[in-house]
């Protein structure tokens, strides 16, 4: 520090001195010590972490700390605090049950110390499997993914205090090993390599090297430039005032999905649930469109906020309600076609003769399932003899298929949904029976939304209820677990265990994806097979 003196009457008369100022030395005064978990089986491992603070409660870096255990052992007897004043070690519990005391003391001042106690019990759980997942399952080069997992024993109970070692075929991991917490959980961070490709992450138990699990993380090019938006509306034809789900995928020039992109949406008529959306880990976005009160055609456009020249559009036909007439006095517009809706004339069945294949399923992956479901009376087709396997299924249609599959005979209850008048006569009895059995419910606004496309999450919940399962899992074990709504996670987990609903590409559940008629048939047959095994 420099100090100068000047005489006001004689400014040219001055004097200067320099005073050296040293940085105040931090003096450690206390240690905060933690053990995770605080209880462990004999021979188990515990993660010991701590922080050294000075008198102003500021962390002190570069301090030597000595660690000791009254019983058991510590993998490192000495440690140096990092830039945040932190240090860590692994404590290995002794072979006898009891309490183990762990002490950490500052080497330069042993009076600055802290002690914690770890409970050691004899109830030894033997780990048999690891459930591992990465979120997201696809990242760009140099990006990060969260790797987490749970260790279970033979009774499917989580195992705490187990040391887990990590390895990656490419890229890097934040930690090479860790210890499971009280709930058997563990985690680390994975940094993707600089080159695109696929990285395999492996977790293995130190004490049980044969217990391993591996997952793959897809690594895309670092700089993805969005090039196109592909859009669709489900259904593509609606009544005035009804809703349609508008979905889209943003991809780059290599047709790879681009995640985290802001999308702006607008409709030429009607309204959008939101004017903006962000693409998920698979480059997808989804919004609700409400049709206008006037029949015609609505054009929905999407453009990227950062790349306004990248656009997409989809058209939705808006029809007058058949029971409401045309306000202009003209002939009412023909309503959109509905799969599995009976003809007005009961003498003309909608189905082809029993046992015959539909006209459009030859070579389809679900051909055998479709034929079997038709024989069981679960599904019907169209008057032209087609089945249209790749057409999406609405909530009302699924209710009909589910009730037919279960052969429900229970007396139907009264429908109290606010939009009950929108449920077609062809589906009212089935919906009412499903409600009576507790298989389906309305949304938060007490609407059933019969014409809304059925999502995979909704289907999972309805199937779980039909199977009388009691879902309790908080993780379904899919790569996109974080995208599964909390109300559907347990159902998705149970159906995965039973082999009824498996992951799609890259072990993704794709909870918001709509279901097709072919997918629905396959799932319902698996449900019936599971019920026969009980």
Image (cartoon, helix red, strand yellow):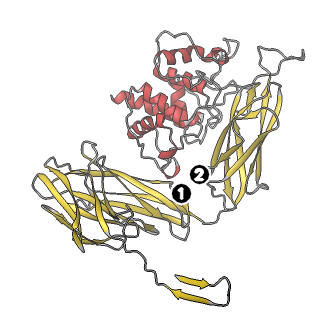
Quadrant of image for the C terminus? top left
Element under label 1? Answer: strand
Residue 85 position, x and y percent, is 36, 67
Question: Can residue 499 be seen here?
Answer: no
Element under label 2? Answer: loop
Residue 168 position, x and y percent, is 41, 66
- Vertical side of 97 occupied by 416: above or below: above
Residue that mark 1 sits on: 138
Which badge, 2 or 1, comes first in the chain's sequence? 1
Residue at the image point whose x is 47% and y is 18% from the top: 407
Residue at the image point whose x is 67% and y is 87% from the top: 10
Residue that mark 2 sits on: 282
- Vertical side of 297 occupied by 195: above or below: below
| Nearest the eye: 191 or 395 | 191
Q: CA gap, disc 2 to disc 1?
A: 8 Å
- Vertical side of 490 occupied by 8: above or below: below
The image's mark for residue 327 is none
Residue at the image point whose x is 52% and y is 28% from the top: 373
Give the mark count.
2
35 with respect to 508 (left or right): left
Residue at the image point whose x is 50% and y is 61% from the top: 144
214 with respect to 431 (left or right): left
- Determine contact: label 2, label 1, CB under 8 Å: yes
Residue 247 position, x and y percent, is 67, 42
Residue 213 position, x and y percent, is 35, 56
| Nearest the eye: 110 or 227 | 110
Q: Hey, which quadrant is residue 166 in on the image?
A: bottom left
Question: Can residue 523 be seen here?
Answer: yes
Graded by Cα atoms within 10 Å as few (under 14), some (14 to 19) or many (20 or more), the crowding at tag 1 reads many
């Amino acid at each position: 520090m420099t100090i100068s003196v000047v005489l006001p009457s004689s400014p040219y008369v001055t004097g200067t001195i320099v005073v050296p100022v040293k940085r105040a030395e931090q003096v450690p005064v206390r240690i905060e010590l933690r053990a995770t978990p605080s209880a462990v089986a004999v021979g188990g491992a515990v993660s010991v972490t701590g922080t050294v603070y000075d008198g102003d409660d500021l962390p002190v870096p570069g301090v030597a700390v000595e660690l000791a255990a009254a019983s058991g052992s510590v993998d490192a007897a000495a440690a140096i605090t990092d830039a945040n004043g932190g240090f860590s070690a692994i404590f290995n519990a002794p072979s006898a049950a009891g309490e183990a005391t762990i002490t950490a003391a500052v080497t330069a001042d042993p009076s600055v110390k802290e002690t914690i106690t770890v409970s050691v019990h004899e109830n030894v759980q033997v780990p048999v499997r690891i459930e591992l997942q990465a979120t997201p399952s696809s990242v760009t080069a140099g990006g990060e993914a969260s790797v987490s997992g749970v260790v279970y024993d033979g009774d499917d109970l989580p195992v705490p205090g187990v040391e887990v070692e990590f390895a990656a075929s490419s890229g890097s991991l934040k930690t090479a090993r860790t210890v499971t917490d009280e709930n058997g959980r563990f985690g680390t961070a994975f940094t993707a390599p600089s080159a695109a490709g696929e990285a395999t992450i492996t977790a293995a138990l130190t004490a049980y090297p044969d217990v391993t699990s591996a997952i793959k993380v897809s690594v895309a090019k670092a700089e993805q430039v969005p090039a196109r938006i592909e859009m669709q509306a489900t259904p593509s034809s609606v009544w005035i005032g009804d809703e349609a789900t508008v979905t889209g995928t943003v991809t780059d020039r290599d047709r790879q999905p681009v995640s985290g992109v802001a999308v702006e949406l607008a409709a030429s008529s009607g309204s959008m649930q939101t004017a903006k959306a962000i693409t998920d880990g698979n480059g997808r976005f989804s919004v609700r469109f409400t049709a206008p009160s006037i029949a015609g055609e609505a054009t929905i456009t999407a453009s990227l906020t950062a790349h306004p020249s990248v656009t997409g559009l989809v058209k939705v036909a808006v029809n007058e309600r058949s029971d409401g007439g045309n306000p202009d006095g003209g002939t009412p517009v023909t309503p959109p076609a509905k799969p599995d809706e009976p003809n007005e004339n009961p003498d003309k069945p909608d189905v082809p003769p029993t046992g015959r294949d539909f006209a459009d399923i030859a070579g389809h992956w679900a051909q055998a399932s479709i034929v079997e479901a038709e024989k069981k009376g679960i599904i019907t087709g169209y008057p032209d003899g087609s089945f249209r396997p790749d057409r999406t299924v609405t909530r009302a249609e699924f209710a009909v298929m589910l009730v037919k599959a279960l052969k429900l005979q229970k007396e139907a209850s009264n429908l109290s949904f606010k939009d009950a008048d929108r449920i077609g006569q062809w589906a009212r009895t089935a919906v009412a029976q499903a409600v009576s059995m507790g298989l389906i419910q309305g949304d938060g606004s007490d609407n059933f939304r019969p014409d809304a496309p059925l999502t995979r999450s909704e289907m999972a919940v309805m199937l779980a209820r039909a199977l009388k399962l009691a879902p309790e899992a908080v993780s379904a074990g899919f790569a996109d677990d974080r995208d599964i709504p909390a109300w559907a996670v347990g159902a998705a987990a149970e159906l995965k265990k039973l082999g009824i609903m498996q992951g799609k590409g890259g072990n993704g559940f794709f909870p918001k994806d709509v279901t097709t008629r072919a997918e629905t048939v396959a799932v319902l047959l698996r449900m019936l097979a599971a019920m026969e095994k009980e």
